[in-house]
Structure formats: structure tokens, C-alpha cells
Image (cartoon, helix red, strand yellow):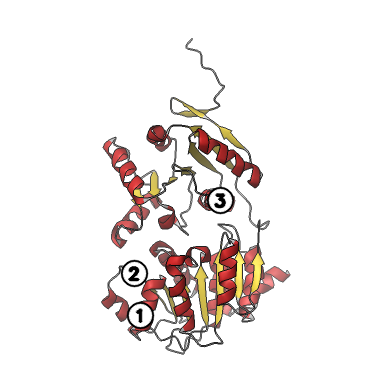
Amino acid sequence: MTENQKVIKDLKPFIGQIWEKAGFSTPTTIQSYAIPAIVENKDVIAQSPTGTGKTLAYLLPALNKIDPEQKSVQAVILASSQELVMQILNELQKWSEGSGIRGASFIGGANVKRQLEKLKKHPHIAVGTPGRILELIKQKKLKMHEVKTVVLDEGDQLLVPEHISTIKEIIKSTLSDRQVVLFSATLPEQTVNMAKELTNDAEIITVEKDETIVAGKVDHIYFMSEQRDKIRLIEKISRLDKVKGLVFVKDIGSLTVLVEKLQYNQIKVSPLHSDMNKMDRQKSIREFRDGKTPMLIATDVAARGLDIEGISHVVHYDFPKDINQYVHRSGRTGRFGASGMVISLVTEREERELKTFAKKLGMDVEMKRFHGESIVDPHVKFSGKR
């Protein structure tokens, strides 16, 4: 048995059984570093690229620590969006099967009464958005004195001005011997500094590239376009063969206009943004996941942490605000050995920025154009002769 495989063997037997049933062999790099550190009760600040198994890196050791005989909440997992909360809860339910460990979700915008009913069932792990979790703590409905672990998932989205005071209050409501762990795909310096204030002598784990994961071949291409003409390119991309495209738009206003125009032109798309209610958001994701719509048009906030298998294309409709955002968005395709394509729709100014990103990331980015329904090189000439 390798040192890596021992990481899972050292956890409770039910975890190892589910690990084998899931067909996993070796833990990913982030899992092999983070799991032992969390099991040893260290605070952890961890960075690892999208798609490298971060959720299990904190979830498995958290499950390992739970005493199912107790009726109290023993771990709290915080995430910035409803979608991410539900995704984490799904994983939690899958990995706690047969263990007697219960999890429950608590999200802003959901019916408070129903969420209080969930607490009466004595979950061992609470997964939620910061605002709602703090609200339940202040109402003395969610008791934090037994909480041993607080997890911040996608930490760089939580340690921002709008959430930071809420996060601090949640952590302060636990006893001083609690463990705080933070995971993110990108960790800007200011996030690390804030995380250090919330943790106690944290172990910092940074994984730049995971060699244990077979990276898919991802092509990075771009089309030149004026802003007003980008919609035509989106229409053409939506007609590509077997397309399952995630399109990023900068804000809700731009997204609404784009979706309305596409639907007016009979293009099937699903919108996703933070002002939509829970049912509509779930419907959009389900229709996209099931292939009923070829494209999900999303804002960055709503798509954060979204894990949908088989995304063939990521499209930067609105150019990313920085290189981190480019990496985050682009990481949604080419996961677990699948191939994918990242398409940027750029103006002349944005083309210069894209080339700067490409240079910093050490990747090739090629200009393309459409010929009919096909993507071709810009210099390819087509003869009208038959």
C-alpha cells in the first residue's frame, strides 16, 4: 500500500468502503496533503486548482471526526452560493451512507420554518450560506458549543467585505479549541492574510498542478468581435455539434438582456444568476445538466463551485476582470481527462489582455472564425468552385 492510499485506510471503515465502491484508487494531491493535516486537528489554508477533489479533501476528515451517537451539530461548512451548498450536501449524503451521520442545508431565501424543522432532526453537519447560518445562531436555534470544525469552501469568495464580519461572528460563536479549514482554487494574498487571522498557526497547502489527475486536452481560442455582435457568435456556438456550453456574463443586467435576445431568436438557453429564486435556479441547472438546453448563461457568483459533468465549452462572453477569474471559469471544462474548449469573445483591447493572460499562464491561444457552422483558422480561404 502506498503512503497516499494509507491516507484513506486510516479513516473510519465506512469511508474506505464508499471510496472503493466509488472506484477511486489513489487520493489526489490535495487530498493526500490535507486529509492527514485535518485528521491531526490542524487548522488548514489550502489552495488547489478546480477539479482536483477539494470537497473530499475536507469532507472525509470532517466525517471521520463526527460522533453519530451525539445529537449536536459538530461541523459547519460555509459556502457562498446556494448551488455550492446543495452540491456539498449531495456529496455529504453520498459519503455518509450507512454511518448514521446526518447533514442538512441552510440557505438564505429558503423558508425559515422548514429550516428550523431540519434542526429538530439533529443534523451532525450543517452546510449553509453565511447569512442564514449566523441568523440561526443569533436566534439560538443553531448551537455552536459542540462544533469542532468550521470549513470555508471557496474561501476567496467568503473572505470578502460583504461576508467577512459574518464569518468572523460564526467562528467566534464556537469554542476556542475548534478547527478552521479553508479551501479555494485561487488564494490572493489578502485572502491568505485574512485567513491567518481566523485560524491558529494554520498549515498552508498549495497545489499548483495535480499530477495525479489526467488533465484533459483543453484548447483556448478566441473570436474578434465588437460587443454588440457577440450575440451572433453565441448563436453559432449554440449550434455546434454536441455542445454543452457554460457562458459567463459580467452582471445580471447584461445576462437578462442576452437571454431575452437569444430566446427571441429561438435559441434554447438556461439562465443562472443570484436574484433567481431557488426553484428557478435548480430548474435551469437541471435542464442544462440533462442536455435539454445546450447552454447555461451564468454570472460568476452563481456559477461559483458549480460542478456539472461534461461541459464541452466555456465561453467568456464578457471578458474576465482578471487572470484568476479566467482560470476559475476556464477550469469548468476539460475535467477528469475529458477534452474541452475555452472560447473568448474579445474586442481589440480585450485581445491584448487575453494574450497577456496566455503568456502568464504559459498557454497557446489561437484566433478563429466561423465558416458556416464550423470553426476555422482565420487565414483559411474557401473557394466557391465545386
Q: What element carries label 3?
A: helix
Disc 1 from disc 2: Cα separation = 11 Å
Q: What element carries label 1?
A: helix
**178 in relation to 27, above or below:** below
Q: Determine which of the numbered discs, if any, sits on residue 327 in the image.
A: 3
Disc 3 from disc 1: Cα separation = 35 Å
Q: What element carries label 2?
A: loop
**In the foreground, 357 or 34:** 357
Mark 3 or mark 1: which comes first in sequence?
Answer: 1
Task: Tell me how many marks there are.
Answer: 3
- Please provide percent x and percent y for residue 18: 54, 71
**Please, what is the three-letter code of the amino acid marked with disc 1?**
Leu
In-image side of 327 versus 303 (left or right): right
- Please provide percent x and percent y for residue 345: 47, 37
- Please provide percent x and percent y for residue 162: 42, 66
Which quarter shows the N terminus?
bottom right
- Answer yes or no: is residue 315 visible: yes
Q: Quadrant of residue 372?
A: top left
Residue drawn 40% across and 66% down? 86
Q: Disc 2 marks which residue?
A: 108
Q: Disc 1 marks which residue?
A: 136
**Please, what is the three-letter code of the amino acid marked with disc 2?**
Gly
Q: How crowded is mark 2: few (under 14 residues within 10 Å), some or many (20 or more)?
A: some
**216 in relation to 231, above or below:** below
**140 in relation to 133, above or below:** below
Q: How crowded is mark 1: few (under 14 residues within 10 Å), some or many (20 or more)?
A: some
Q: Determine which of the numbered discs, if any, sits on residue 339 in the image.
A: none
